[in-house]
Amino acid sequence: MALLPMRALQRLRNLRNKLSALPSSSSASSTSSSSSSGKISNARLLLINTGTCCFLYSMGDFCRQRIEGNTTDWHRTGRMGVLGCCLGPLDHFWYTALDRLLPAITAGTVARKVLLDQLIMAPICCSLFYLGMSAMEGRSRKDCFNELQVKFWPTYKVDWQVWPAAQILNFYLIPPHFRVAYVASITFLWTVYLSYMKHKKMSKTDSMLIH
């Protein structure tokens, strides 16, 4: 029985090696490409990641409204898209820094990456989401922080149930040039949940606790 985890780990390594061997846009370029072309590709990747976040946040909210069965509030969907545009560059530079700081693909390195992501980036993004959305709704600073106080912990607890497992696969198994597509699929489902939490009305008990 003790051999089963080792066999599963070896299969994951083999799959990772096969995925890494697949061609990507970066490998298609010449090895003698100049540093300027590297900067262009990095800038292009930043734009792609930002646009992807904008699209996914918008679509996540749109799908949530379809689930609710209400008439589509395009202003609400637009606000989600704007927030995605703001969080996209933050995510891009964060994961780029993580890969540079911890480049090795080992169990210990992946565990450190996931822990850093959950303890630093996750609470920052969660806070910026609620504060940013509330600010775009024209709410007062007090109302913005009141909503954050009520909804932060429930959201953060669900974040721990979703993202660590997803990020372990991301950091350990998925090659860097496929991570955007992989994370995008998880992000879409996550933004549907975020839209639900953001527009979930606070109970009377919650309202009493923050006053």
Image (spheres, grey):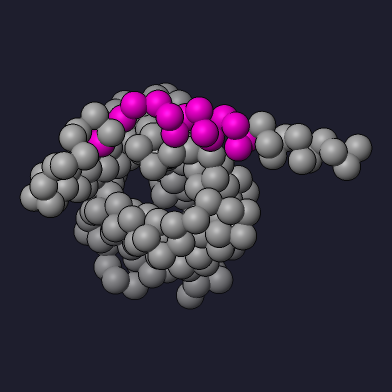
Res 148 visible: no
Residue 172, percent from left and from top:
54, 45
Res 112 visible: yes
Q: Is residue 144 left or right of residue 118?
A: left
Which secondary structure is most common in the magenta stretch?
helix
Q: Is residue 208 left or right of residue 179?
A: right
Q: Nearer the viewer, residue 173 or 67?
A: 173
Q: Spot the residue most to the left.
A: 36
Q: For the N terminus, give its image quadrant.
A: top right
Q: Is residue 21 magenta?
A: yes
- Above or below, comparing residue 196 to residue 72 in the picture: below
Q: How many marks?
A: 0
Q: Is residue 154 left or right of residue 56?
A: right
Q: Nearer the viewer, residue 174 or 56?
A: 174
Residue 62, percent from left and from top:
33, 30
Residue located at (50% from left, 72% from top): 210
Residue located at (35% from left, 37% from top): 177
- Above or below, comparing residue 139 to residue 179 in the picture: below
Residue 30, percent from left and from top:
18, 35
Residue 179, percent from left and from top:
40, 39
Residue located at (56% from left, 63% from top): 112
- Above or below, comparing residue 174 to residue 157 in the picture: above
Q: Spot the residue most to the right.
A: 1
Q: Spot the residue most to the front.
A: 32
Residue located at (25% from left, 60% from top): 135
Q: Quadrant of residue 130?
A: bottom left
Q: Quadrant of residue 195?
A: top left
Image: magenta residue range: 12-26
Q: Is residue 197 magenta?
A: no
